[in-house]
Amino acid sequence: MGISFLIRGIRVIHGQKVSPLKTRFIVNLRSGRAARCLPALKKFATEQGAAVTQTEHPRHATDLAKRALDDGIELIVAVGGDGTMNEVASALVGTGATLGLVPCGSGDGLGRHLGLHGPPVRAFDILRHGRPRLIDSALADGHPFFTAAGLGFEAEIAQRFNQLTQRGFLRYLSTSAAAFREWRPEHYTIIHGDQREQVHAFTLVVANSDQYGNNALIAPEARIDDGRLNLCAIPPITWLNAVPLVTRLFSGSIDKGRNVTSRTSGRFIVERTGSGPLHTDGELHEAGAQIEFIVRPSSLRVMCPA
């Protein structure tokens, strides 16, 4: 396999300079800061000889990414939040194309894990001087995800959050607080390898990277290129354990919390009492009572800091 990376916009293979990577930007103006970033993005794209396309409806980013692949584009850049990233990356899994990120969303879980988070000018610099890195992806009930997928309270929050016209971290907190008063924990059966165990959980996540976003480290030990997934089931929340669990979530020790279930495997099957919502990188789906989570090792190229 050839070693390829960028130096000042020039592709280098085995130490020899060749043509610049063919690049296209896919922008979701509904995501966070994407609209404010657009003028600088268009200027940068013009300098790179790249086209800028904009999404018009849900799942449109996937269609635009597939069209870019058909056009022979080698570097396809998602400009938006984790949902936009998911749509673009889903089309690139298993191809020779590279995913670029200009993170503009409220959480930016994948970007933070890979060290890409920051202002647009930093993202532009990484696109010029970075190096492609192979990472794992995963499937939840057949739906691709790259940071985290989950059931329970977090799927409920994803459902409510996606209905908001204005988003952001503060809106996420207020939405979570409103839902918390109404939510009830659920019973789950977790199957991995020859192990089968029962848990009563407030929320259950299977993670490919270490966090949801905003440095909320739901799977502190997760590595995005180890061929494994990390499951974390949070116990029912009470007034006694709420603050310690939140503190651990942001300090990187949630897996050490009392009654927290933490497991790692290349494949999980999770059973619940009935069908209900499932989220993948914050995008909502309806799923059945049994859900399979499976890793796809080294299946996606992402442009990362050199």
Image (spheres, rainbow, N blue to C red):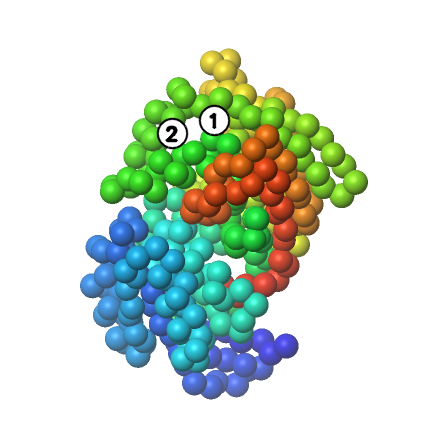
Name, please, the residue furthest toward the right. 194
Q: Where is residue 89 in the image (x, y as percent from the top left)?
A: 47, 61
Q: Give amino acid for label 2.
A: Ser
- Name the quadrant containing residue 60: bottom left
The quarter of the image holding the N terminus is bottom right
Label 2 residue SS = helix
Q: Name the residue under label 1.
A: 246
Q: Mark 2 points at which residue?
A: 176
Q: In this view, does 97 lie above or below 157?
A: below
Q: Position of residue 233 (x, y in %)?
A: 59, 31
Query: Residue at image x 39%, y 73%?
Result: 67
Label 1 residue SS = helix
Along the line of sight, the residue nearer the viewer: 142 or 134: 142
- Name the quadrant containing residue 161: top left
Q: Is residue 149 above or below residue 273?
A: below
Whether residue 274 is visible here, answered yes or no, is yes
Nearer the viewer's eye, disc 2 or disc 1?
A: 2
Q: Position of residue 91 (x, y in %)?
A: 47, 65
Query: Residue at image x 38%, y 29%?
Result: 176
- Name the quadrant containing residue 116: bottom left
Residue 43: which disc? none
Q: In this view, does 158 lie above or below 56?
A: above
Left or right of residue 302, residue 78 in this image: left
Query: Residue at image x 26%, y 75%?
Result: 46
Q: Give amino acid for label 1.
A: Val
Name, please, the residue furthest toward the top. 240
